[in-house]
Image (tube, rainbow, N blue to C red):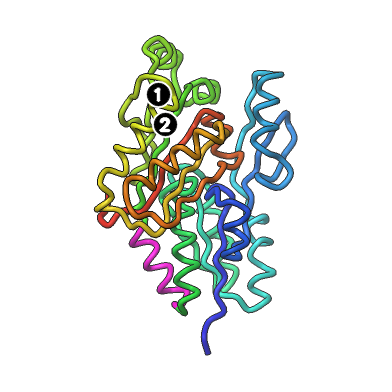
Amino acid sequence: MAEKILITSDSTTDLSPELLKRYRIPVMPLIVNLNDVDHKDGIDITPEEIYRNYELNHSLPKTAAPNLADCTEFFRPFVEQGYHIVHFTISSEMSSTYQNSVIASEEFENVHVVDTRNLSTGGGLLVIRAAELAAQGMGAAAIVEECRRLAPYVDASFVIDSLEFLHKGGRCSTLAMLGANVMKFKPCIIVKDGKMSVGKKYRGKFDAVLQQYVAERIGDGSDIDNSHVFITHGGCDPEIAQACAEKVRSLGDFPNVHITHANCTVCSHCGPGTLGVLFIRKHPI
């Protein structure tokens, strides 16, 4: 008898409501504490509320992993319905979400947890791949094995217009922020081996920088799995995001270029002036 597979994800994979519905993916929200009140990412708080609060109070929320009870109660109803669950989390280097999910999964027989070694739609790419493999009839254990194999192939990066949110959240020194502001740098943040690091530092107007950045990341497209490419942003002008998507399409045969808005966890650290192009390569990065 074929396994009854369900692909699930935490809220950091930043998949749009349309994609979550298309692939039938339930989401476990991370916790966003704003003004001493806990909220569930993507359920009862939005990035726009975080930005408005910052304008008024100059304070940012704190984000936290779902606790063990949250994870257990998320899995339980699906297990009781007979599903074999393959659950995806933000990189274990960035959050305890993975560890809590693994501990919770040990209470059940058929819950498998995958560390995406990534964040945002870098993890979302693996979620979609898993859903497509499940639709083809692949079993849960094989899906887990394939997605863990693919994790090092995910190319995830973002360009940040301003370091203000990173600085305010304690992830960037005052000296670095002042230097970037003076030189008008737009740093590229790259995810590799489950961690974030600074890559190329661009200069110029944000929209022009993004066109250059997208062209450089995509290149001639020959090393890219063209099935899905994401343009994910923190609240950019829709025209800028659309122009980046069109740039991707101009560089090769990319049938599915998705534009998504990051959820609260990513936005609270990077701010509205953030945009990335994310995809899977044919070789590890």
From this view, report whether residue 165 is shown above or below residue 68: above
Q: Position of residue 6 (x, y in %)?
A: 57, 70
Please tell me the numbered disc located at residue 186: 1
Residue in the image at 50% along x and 67% along y: 131
Between 175 and 14, which is closer to the camera in this rendering? 14
Q: Are marks 1 and 2 in contact (CB under 8 Å)?
A: yes
Highlighted range, magenta:
138-150
Residue 33 location, quadrant: top right
Residue placed under numbered mark 2 in the picture: 159
Q: What is the count of numbered marks?
A: 2
Secondary structure that dominates the magenta span = helix
Q: Judge left or right: residue 255 versus residue 259.
A: left
Question: Which of the 4 image quadrants contains residue 178?
Answer: top left
What x and y, as percent, mark residue 193?
34, 46
- Badge 1 amino acid: Lys
Residue 230 percent across, percent down from the top left: 45, 48
Residue 140 covered by magenta stretch: yes
Question: In which quarter of the view is residue 150 placed?
Answer: bottom left
At label 2, the amino acid type is Val
